[in-house]
Image (cartoon, rainbow, N blue to C red):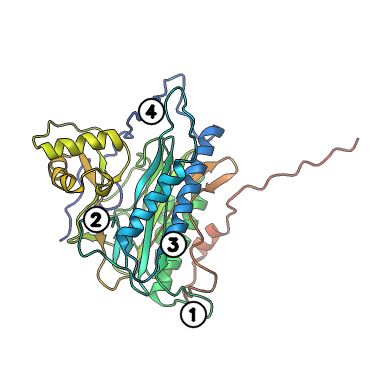
Amino acid sequence: HCPPPPQRGQNTQFGLFRLELMPDERIDGNAVEPTEDEPEPNVSNSDVCTKYREAGKIANLALQGLMLQVRPGAKVLDLCKFGDTVIMQKCSTIYQKKIKGKPVEKGVAFPTCVSVNECVCHNSPLESDTPGEILSEGDMVKLDIGCYVDGYIAVVAHTMVCGNQPSVDRPISGPQADVLHAAHVACEVAQKLLRPGNTNSQVTKAINKVASDFGVNACTGVLSHRLKRFVIDGNKVIILREETDQKVEDSCFELNEVYSIDIVMSTGDGKPKEMQSRTTVFKRSVDKNYMLKMRSSRTLFNEVNAKFPALPFALRALEDERQARMGVVECLKHELIHPFPVLFEKKGDYVAHFKSTVLILPSGPTRITGLKSFEAGSVKTDKILSDEVNAIMSLASKKRKKKNKKKPV
């Protein structure tokens, strides 16, 4: 079925898509609300920048580990658990000292999702889901993961083929290659345009030009959000593809902002829909309150408030998965939590997903997450980039440092 147009406060598909963007949602965690005299620290602060980079390193490390686990016969559930475990274990080894008597909060910023073939996103199964999904040779696997350190978030997503990897001798070609190239180039283009003074609409236009060049479609409902401390869905966004019922306010990028660049391309019509798969990833709606009636709902809600007050979580991360599945129904009914539904294109469509975290620094846009999309020559396309896209791709990502000429004595 085709979902109805989004309403205010309702989430559609990838992120929290709002026709009227609400103020940034944040929860205290142990975050300190900045006063008028004391603005919120950003990446111009070396400590903040270091925490973003540490979160990025851990997210990349977990992604690399996940990629090694992607093989025929592997269970999707095991991969999801593995990704979350790597992040938790690595986080436990850094920032171990308390600050002002409080431990530094760190951990999973977005639960590991493994979405296969025409499944687009948010597939993060539970122990109780039977039979469990198993990977096969040739599956197109999308890995999505996130980490935070002291509330500073780094997210990453990657697409790969299960089993024998494409190579120069055995390259991928045709529509599958086109969609991989399109998603890769769109990521590069978006990053290069992420400069102070440029606008979100410039990026949206460029991404859709890339999709057109490769004969594929950008997926609807995908938002790249500004990231802030404990805020994974800031209210400054880049929409991947505008529709009549899905538009966002124009905004300019500013120095020292941080964005998640979220790119999803499809050989299908790019309008993913919900199917039978159960939604397992949620996020607390911090602006909603309600006196829940069912005991299982109250137990779930109390645990979410204690463990995941601001960032997304998977139901399998809760103490009692069976009780959580029961309690989530009433919480959803009263909009106390936002769902991240599992979405699908049509069977046989190829979908590629890449996501990176980018800091807008004085030296230029700086990517702190994201791995090499594919080996050169292993994914072959006969599509040619337009002059417009080539011009953006030729932009230097970083400003070159001027060498100080020594004055003669």
- Residue lying farthest to the top in this orientation: 37
**Residue at image mark 1:** 170
> Is residue 234 toward the left or the right of residue 325 in the image?
right
The x and y percentages for residue 148 are 42, 41
Look at the numbered discs 2 and 4 and tell me whether their residues touch, using CB distance below 8 Å: no
**Residue at image mark 4:** 30
Residue type beneath disc 1: Arg
Sequence order check, earlier mark of 1 and 3: 3
Residue type beneath disc 2: Glu
**Residue at image mark 2:** 127
Q: Nearer the viewer, mark 1 or mark 2?
A: 2
Sequence order check, earlier mark of 3 and 2: 3
Task: State the residue at coordinates (58%, 40%).
Answer: 362
Task: State the residue at coordinates (19%, 61%).
Answer: 275
Residue type beneath disc 4: Asn
| Front position in the image: 161 or 248 | 161
Label 3 CA crowd tier, 10 Å (few <14, some 14–19, many 20+): many
The x and y percentages for residue 82 are 38, 55
